Image (cartoon, rainbow, N blue to C red):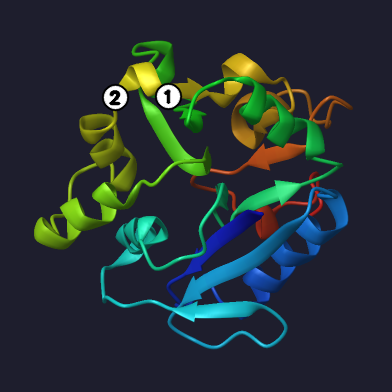
Amino acid sequence: MLTVITVLRSGPEYNAEKVLAVHAMVERNLTIPHEFICLSDVEILGVKTIPLKHHWPGWYAKMEIYRPDLPEGPKLYLDLDTSIVSNMDSVLEAATASGKPFVILRDFYRGAVNPFSMGSGFMYWNIDMSFLYHWYLKNPVEIRGGDQVILEQLLNVKAVAFWQDITESVCSFKVHIRPLNQILPKYSVVCFHGKPRPWEQNLVPYK
């Protein structure tokens, strides 16, 4: 069964309320059988919570999503600053149909120069990726650009598909929605990166 994962390293900006918002959007817009879990440093009432094992800061806490002790089977990861605005079943179907074991965002800005640059805010994989966790466990470094730069260094790009190449339903708020000041019907997953956060704007629903 599909496992949908998010991560909460709690702080002044990210908290249990954001997890509950993402959980509600997933449950409303994903009919494919799945289990929603959150790796977190706090218990979240109403969501299956798995404690973070390490005190890796900020986005490096996301390296725990590749832990070998998590449920087996395909995984879908999304950052807490992601909005799901309509049914996303076709997005998962596109990932499966891609024939690639790992699907990730092409960085919405760096991708214009390097088509293999990665954005880790929304990912899918259907194989054991625990080597990423074990690598970071041995090398808990902070790299400019964060965990996605680590993925660029460690992943075989031939085994990777990019969402932008397999579906039109995944988009960037800054790149695709804000310039038009509207959400096109084809979009179901809206990725926010940097400011504004989804809870700091009124164009795209986040609840």
Q: Which residue is mark 2?
A: 156
Please identify the quarter of the rendering in which residue 118 is found: top left
| Quadrant (top left, top right, bottom left, bottom right) of the N terminus | bottom right
Q: Position of residue 198 (x, y in %)?
A: 67, 53
Q: Is residue 207 visible?
A: no
- Name the amino acid type tagged 1: Val
Q: Is residue 48 above or below residue 82?
A: below
Query: How many other residues sit within 10 Å of disc 2, few (<14), some (14-19) or many (≥20)?
Result: few
Q: Please name the residue shown 72% across and 52% down the image.
A: 201
Of 67 and 60, the residue lying toward us: 67
Residue 105, x across and y down, in percent: 50, 30
Does 18 sit left or right of 10 as displayed?
right
Q: Judging from the image, what secondary structure is the residue with disc 1 in?
A: strand
- Vertical position of residue 157 compared to residue 86: above or below: above
Image-based side of 29 in relation to 44, left or right: right
Q: Which of 179/2 is in front?
A: 2
SS label for mark 2: loop
Tell me if residue 2 comes above or below residue 150 in the rendering: below
- Quick check: 156 above or below 24? above
Q: Is residue 124 left or right of residue 66?
A: right
Give the image location of residue 195, x and y in percent.
Answer: 53, 48
Q: Residue at x 79, y 40 (%)?
A: 88
Q: Nearer the viewer, residue 19 or 138?
A: 138
In this rendering, does residue 69 appear at all? yes
How far is the residue under mark 2 from the one under mark 1?
7 Å
Query: In the image, residue 13 lies at what x, y percent?
Result: 51, 70
Q: Circle 1: is it few (<14), some (14-19), or many (20+) Cα within 10 Å?
A: some
**Quadrant for the C terminus in the image:** bottom right
Decide: marks 2, 1 in contact (CB < 8 A)?
yes
Residue drawn at 78 percent across, 54 percent down? 33
Circle 2: residue type: Asn
Give the residue pinned by disc 1: 160
